[in-house]
Amino acid sequence: MTEMTERLAVVALSLADARIWTHGMLPHTQPQHVHISELHLSRHRRHEGHSSGREDMYDDPDFYEEIIESIKESHEILLFGHGKGKASAMLKFCQYVERKHPEIAQRFVDALDADLADLTNDQILDHARKWQLQELQQS
């Protein structure tokens, strides 16, 4: 199972940041943190009166590309996110990757809803390990 966990990247994605595990899912493994650019947010706030609203405030291609750079070598990618509809960072990210990097989008194995604000890193990894065990049992 160690080899399987090394092949799987776990991405926990919220509107303004991402926690990314690409080197296994052992307890206490620390993620890489990627944050949306403060410059992007301040630029959007300044022009907010001319935008379509809050839902596009967090659409930052540089943020998405930094996440993609971290996971591009992974064989499988498991996504966690929260929010519904236009507020779903995970959905926006998936759509971006499908348009710009379809070869990476093909490696998405699942997208799970979770209340990320209430989950610790270890709890996210625990959910990922349970997901992986369930997948192994079904195959």
Image (spheres, helix red, strand yellow):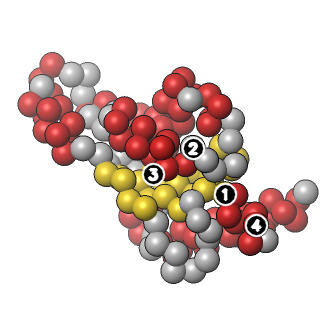
Per the image, label 4 sits on a secondary structure element best described as: helix
Q: Is residue 59 above or below residue 8?
A: above
Whether residues under marks 1 and 4 lie with C-beta atoms below 8 angstroms apart, the answer is no
The residue that mark 4 highlights is: 3
Disc with the residue nearer the chain's start (1 vs 2) = 1
Instruction: Report the Cα–Cα distance between label 1 and label 4.
Output: 9 Å
Disc with the residue nearer the chain's start (4 vs 2) = 4
- Whole-percent x, y for residue 53 in the image: 24, 28
Disc 4 marks which amino acid?
Glu
Between 81 and 129, the residue placed more toward the observer is 129
Disc 3 marks which amino acid?
Leu
Between 3 and 25, the residue placed more toward the observer is 3
Which image quarter: residue 105? top right
Depth-wise, is mark 2 or mark 3 nearer the camera? Answer: 2
Residue 13 tag number: 3
Depth-wise, is mark 1 or mark 2 nearer the camera? Answer: 2
Residue 8 tag number: 1
Instruction: Report the Cα–Cα distance between label 1 and label 3.
Output: 16 Å
Instruction: Report the Cα–Cα distance between label 4 and label 2.
Output: 18 Å
Crowding around mark 1 (Cα neighbors within 10 Å: few <14, some 14 to 19, many 20+) is many
Q: Residue drawn at (46%, 35%), measured in percent from left and top?
A: 92
Disc with the residue nearer the chain's start (2 vs 3) = 3
Crowding around mark 4 (Cα neighbors within 10 Å: few <14, some 14 to 19, many 20+) is few
